Amino acid sequence: MAFDLETAANQQNLRRIAIDPISRVEGHGKITLLLGDDGRVHQARLHIVEFRGFEKFIQGRPYWEAPVMVQRLCGICPVSHQIAAAKALDHVVGAPPPSAEKMRRLMHYGQILQSHALHFFFLSSPDLLFGFDAEVDQRNIVAVAAQYPEIARQGIALRKWGQEAIRLTSGKRVHGTGAIPGGINKLLSAAERDELRADADQMVAWSRDAVELVKKLIDANRAQFEQFGLFRSSMMSLVRGDGALELYDGGLRARGADGALIFDGASDQKYDTLIREEVKPWTYMKFPYFTQFGRDDGWYKVGPLARVQNCDFISTPLAEVERRIFIEASGGKICHAPLAYHWTRMIEMLHAAELIRDLLDDPDLLAGERIGSGARGHGGVGVIEAPRGTLIHQYEVGDDDLITMCNLIVSTTHNNQAMNEAVRSVARQYIDGQRVTEALLNRIEIVIRAFDPCLSCATHALGKMPLIVELLDASGASVDRLVRNA
């Protein structure tokens, strides 16, 4: 019988805490905790509470509509879905020419940079700058701008520059049309290239400042950094053929919690032999796991923390220096601290800034073929490293050019079990035997924010939702209640 939190609470005299929805994340979800009479946490779960239907309603549509349609999964990371879909459907119409791939890469690096800047400066920096116990009216970008105006200014400018890279390559900052099956819609003009190039060195410098800021904040409270929400798991990411960190293309590499290789150089077209997905009755988000280890032991994490440790080196010099500092700080061992996502996220933002700056000198961005050609295929897989982690799109296409099957494994889905483990760890550290307070509530949300979950990729919810945290006794009577955004 499926485990049900409400039933368990009634049968075992457990108390239930609901955090609904989680704040300062992209999308909507909730967390439920079950506490026993001794106040100890018996269960902790992250729920995705809205239905996700893109895999079904994309069926029956012409394949060339897919990159434009599926990017409506999200307004924060549409570029990632657009490019992953285009890459998958390249297998139907033919590989893009070099100029088209470089334009896609420029678009993708802009997405990495703007998304990392958005998450760190707008959503997570209040927790790190003001502390976990700060008043709720301090934990926002407005307070950051008031007390740390230069940090806020740099964060806003970095995001804007990344968005401009997207606009100039895809037509719009949000939901553009740049990447299409087999190629791209447009190349850059010399004026557009020069517009981005004018600020490139400054953006690299500010990205370096962001890495230094994270290191300073972590050094100020290293014990908390190392232990907060700690859990161990395997990890997965794309890696370039020579072992470099790769965001656009490459082979799949996975390591165990101790760093030992599980698989390496695996073809993205064979991902479904490596990964399976489990469905559970209490959430609409699936639980991927490595096939060889099974449901219980095969879960893993993706994203910046996995990528920076999974690769052998980073191809841009400034980011590589920072990667080595990060590895040395962990004593050469795999770092599993969830707060380390912030550190590695800023290393990746620096890497993206360097990549954009260097790529702008390539003449292929201004002149070259936009569309490739090849033998007609009937489907394929597109895998990229989205800001939040590995993103998989798979399509099958009939002879009539209509999509017959679609499967999407978004980055947040890969991290599903890892986020549940992190929530459980923090709950047991801070909630056991305690009265519900804003500070304790915020700690649970902080560990979720560390993963930068894009819940909208799985929920597509609309409208404003209040945050209600309620503690009930075994009879269902309210013991304690907090309301936010009512």
Image (cartoon, grey):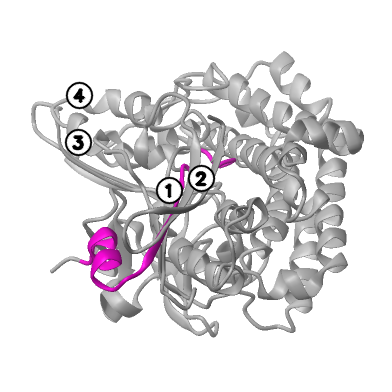
Say which amino acid is labelled 2.
Ile
Q: Amino acid at mark 4?
A: Pro
N-terminal label among 2 and 3? 2
Crowding near pointer 4: few (<14 within 10 Å), some, many (20+)? some
Q: Quadrant of residue 81?
A: top left
Depth order, front residue of 245/77: 77
Label for residue 30?
1
User: Distance between the Cα atoms at labels 2 and 1?
Assistant: 6 Å
Q: Is residue 10 magenta?
A: yes
**Magenta stretch in the rendered image:** 3-26
* Element at label 1: strand
Residue 22, numbered label: 2
Gap in angstroms between the C-alphas marked 1 and 4:
36 Å
Q: Quadrant of the N terminus?
A: bottom left
Residue 290, position as x, y percentages in the image: 32, 72
- State which tag comes first along the sequence, 3 or 4: 4
Q: Is residue 362 above or below residue 345?
A: above
**Residue toward you, 239 or 209:** 209
Can residue 114 be spotted in the picture? yes
Figure label count = 4
At label 1, counting other C-alpha atoms closer than 10 Å, the crowd grade (few under 14, some 14-19, many 20 or more) is: many
